[in-house]
Image: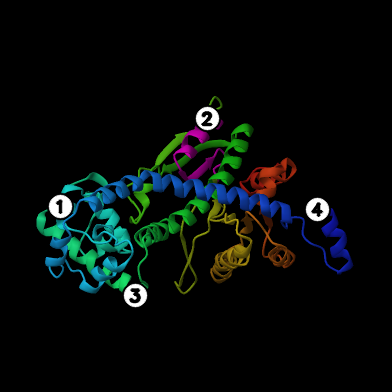
């Protein structure tokens, strides 16, 4: 529905829909872009894991494996005999190697540890937590000892036996189990990547604008690079933080494009007036009785005059059904800032909210926050990306939030 028609209709209902509310077409375009971004991300990781090659290896094993050896050693290998019977009773029978590991498989093809681990619905993270770290074998092809190969096989096989006895069996159930577990592992990465990309886009706009005005002094950032290395991994605290000093001759477009291709996570923008734009920094404020209030907005600015001049929350998700939850999460973070400022007798920073989409219901609530004086501004990231007038308004606001008149 066009925005003008919505405004006319809303006037008959006695309420005005805020201009920053997403139209149905804007939501569709945002969802389309989000689906493409998320899909490309997940496919890239699946390809990087060489899963097709693993399946080819398992298929080759299934064409020439010792069925009697499995039956004779089922207890030693941690397999429930009833599970083997299920595989036999399917027409045609399903090869045992599709589901059950053999220590010999893992010593000859260490990368198969990833396959059987996923069929067993286990993550690398949890394997590390139980003292059976498989990263070296899965990622670098290190050959496990015979003893470890047996221990891993027994552990995987015991879980897989129970799973197929509970859920039943089909010719492709092993693929369903493995891909479900991989998808679950990638879910968190996908959500984090959506947020990272939205923040990077906001900083891209700001950095280009400040450089054009001659206000930008430096950019601090880290590069995350490989997506597949993040699957089931703990955060890497050793990632190198880099400082890039900006000059009038800097090709800012080229620099931003290069770092964003490597999944940049911006840390700080320093301006020539002494202001800093900080990202994902936690602050601790104390009241007169030394009670600590911890706050951690997505973005905030500091200056020589104030420890927080402005703060903003960014929600990059493009799911209309999640718009309420995104706003709820943002208000929790913003309310912590409001409460902490009041309790510690500090000036209330100006506050902003960014979202890829704002359904009408949420937009109305956001407008009420503005009317109540709790929120200074709101930015629809889809409108900013599609409408130069909205982009310029946003950049003008940010210039002011960073201590310059615009």
Residue under label 2, please give it: 254
The segment highlighted magenta reads: 253-275
* First reached walking from the N terminus: tag 1 or tag 2: 1
Residue under label 4, please give it: 2
Q: 294 and 37: which one is in front?
A: 37
Residue at the front extreme of this rendering: 91
Is residue 131 within the magenta segment? no
Q: Position of residue 67 (x, y in %)?
A: 18, 60
Residue at the top extreme of this rendering: 249
- What is the secondary structure assignment of the residue under circle 4? loop
Mark 2 to mark 4: distance in Å? 36 Å
- Where residue 253 sits, quadrant-wise, is top right
Mark 3 to mark 1: distance in Å? 31 Å
- What is the secondary structure assignment of the residue under circle 1? loop
Is residue 262 within the magenta segment? yes
Q: Is residue 227 visible?
A: no
Residue under label 1, please give it: 144
């Amino acid at each position: 529905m066009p925005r003008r028609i919505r405004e006319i209709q809303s006037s008959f209902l006695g309420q005005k829909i805020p201009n920053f509310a997403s139209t149905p077409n804007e939501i569709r375009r945002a969802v389309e872009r989000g689906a493409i971004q998320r899909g490309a991300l997940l496919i890239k990781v699946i390809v990087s894991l060489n899963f097709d090659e693993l399946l080819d290896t398992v298929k080759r094993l299934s064409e020439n494996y010792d069925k009697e050896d499995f039956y004779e050693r089922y207890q030693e290998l941690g397999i429930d005999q009833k599970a083997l019977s299920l595989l036999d009773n399917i027409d045609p029978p399903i090869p045992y190697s599709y589901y059950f590991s053999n220590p010999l498989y893992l010593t000859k093809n260490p990368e198969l540890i990833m396959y059987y681990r996923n069929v067993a619905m286990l993550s690398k993270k949890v394997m590390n937590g139980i003292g059976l770290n498989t990263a070296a074998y899965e990622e670098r092809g290190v050959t496990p000892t015979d003893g470890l190969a047996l221990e891993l096989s027994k552990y995987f096989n015991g879980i897989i036996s129970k799973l197929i006895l509970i859920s039943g069996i089909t010719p492709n159930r092993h693929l369903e189990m493995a891909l479900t577990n991989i998808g679950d592992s990638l879910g968190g990465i996908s959500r984090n990547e959506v947020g990272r990309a939205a923040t990077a886009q906001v900083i891209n706009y700001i950095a280009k604008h400040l450089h054009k005005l001659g206000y930008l002094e430096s950019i601090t950032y880290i590069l995350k690079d490989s997506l597949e290395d993040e699957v089931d991994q703990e955060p890497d605290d050793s990632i190198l933080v880099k400082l890039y000093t900006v000059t009038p001759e800097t090709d800012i477009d080229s620099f931003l494009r290069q770092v964003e291709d490597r999944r940049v996570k911006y840390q700080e923008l320093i301006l020539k007036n002494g202001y800093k734009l900080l990202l994902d920094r936690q602050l601790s404020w104390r009241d007169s009785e030394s009670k600590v209030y911890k706050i951690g907005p997505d973005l905030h600015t500091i200056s020589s005059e104030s420890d927080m001049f402005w703060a903003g929350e960014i929600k990059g998700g493009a799911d209309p059904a999640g718009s309420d939850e995104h706003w709820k999460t943002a208000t929790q973070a913003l309310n912590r800032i409001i409460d902490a400022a009041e309790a510690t007798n500090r000036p209330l920073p100006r506050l902003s909210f960014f979202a890829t989409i704002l359904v009408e219901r949420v937009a109305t609530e956001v407008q009420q926050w503005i009317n109540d004086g709790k929120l200074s501004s709101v930015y629809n990231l889809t409108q900013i990306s599609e409408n130069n007038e909205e982009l310029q308004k946003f950049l003008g606001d940010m210039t002011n939030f960073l201590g310059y008149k615009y």
